[in-house]
Image (tube, rainbow, N blue to C red):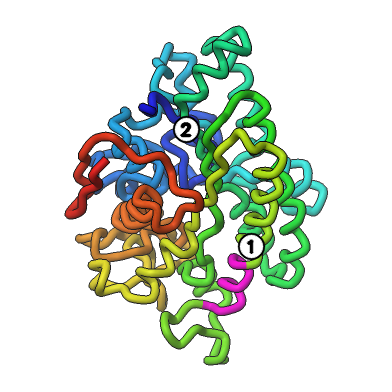
Amino acid sequence: MFLLRIFSFGDSLADTGNFIRSGALAFPVISKLPYGQTFFHHSTGRCSDGRLVIDFIAEAYGLPLLPPYMEHSKGQNFSSGVNFAIAGATALDAKFFHDRNLGSLLWTNKSLTDQLNWFKELKSSLCTTKKDCDEYFRKSLFVMGEIGGNDYNYPLLVGRGVKEVRALVPLVVDAIAMATSMLIEEGAREIVVPGNLPIGCSAVFLTIYQTPNKSAYDPTNGCLKAFNGFSKYHNNQLKIALENLRTKYPHAKIIYADYYGAAHRFFHSPLQYGFESGTLTACCGGGGPYNFNITARCGHIGSKACSNPSTFANWDGIHLTEASYRHIAMSLLNGTHTSPPMRTPYTLVALGDAAIEM
């Protein structure tokens, strides 16, 4: 069955321009170069030097890159899908963080709930009867994130600690599961739910939680063991929740996307994936052991971007490069890190040096 459209939800790992159109001012540097320099040659609001996982998925199915939902006021055509993801978004509502004195850290007050509401508002213009909606969404792919990472990032960035933040996992996983359930109730039949990346390999955490204690680091890749262990805990809980949803909705195809496993390969073997400049040091930053400086982040005064981002896995210390996202997307599309596999793409699309036979 041909795939005609994609609906994307999530945070900065999937945002194709909603954040810079939302009026949010927390991180305005993503609205200008060097963000977007590699593929687009100008900023698009993506938190990378180029394309994201969702872009490569769209290309693989022969679809246009997803327009951000915030362009709806301009009469944007959403016939091939739409992207609701917004940088800084959380799975839990913003009030949760404001109540815990973390509200000042939020890039945006828009959460997964807001994105689901946007979808429901748009749905009425896409189909009217249940029969029409079932047929419409039967030929659609839903991608739920990545989402949830920011729910942990905000408290971790102010030193709350892995043990304390671990208590949030059941709440975050439940929010993702409820959102997935809601989309299925609304008509979704194929939905991809990604897990979290190995955050112990992120330059921001390697910088903030740097320690002389060598036992804190994985000797095979230099990542922080406790943080990667946390990511694996979240992902395991999410997989359990998805298995419960599969029992409840046997007619739907609920796919777990193993972002952790897909990324861990190149953190473990950088040269094998073309990352001659390494995986832990940011391409764009303001210095320091991992080229991440909180006072001179990528795009700010005192920072600069490397000349060849494709040799780096890490873009700005928080997000990955287009080259990294390409490797992750490839492993999802070919079924290596999706369970069950996604539907087979039906065209031949070159993704860098590799190609997928659809």
Q: Which of the two residues, 253 or 25, is positioned nearer the viewer here?
A: 253
Asked if residue 134 lies in the magenta stretch, the reply is: no
Secondary structure under the numbered disc 2 in the rendered image: strand
Secondary structure under the numbered disc 1 in the rendered image: helix
Determine the CA span between mark 2 and mark 1. 23 Å
Crowding around mark 1 (Cα neighbors within 10 Å: few <14, some 14 to 19, many 20+) is: some
- Image spot of residue 118 (x, y percent): 60, 24
User: Where does the magenta region start and end?
Assistant: 224-232
Describe residue 302's horizontal placement relative to residue 41 as left or right: right
Q: Is residue 32 visible?
A: no
Which SS does the magenta portion mostly show?
helix
Q: Amino acid at mark 1?
A: Asn
**Which residue shows up at 68% across the image and 31% down it?**
182
| Residue bearing the label numbered 2 | 141
Q: Amino acid at mark 2?
A: Leu
| Residue bearing the label numbered 1 | 236
Quadrant housing residue 348: top left
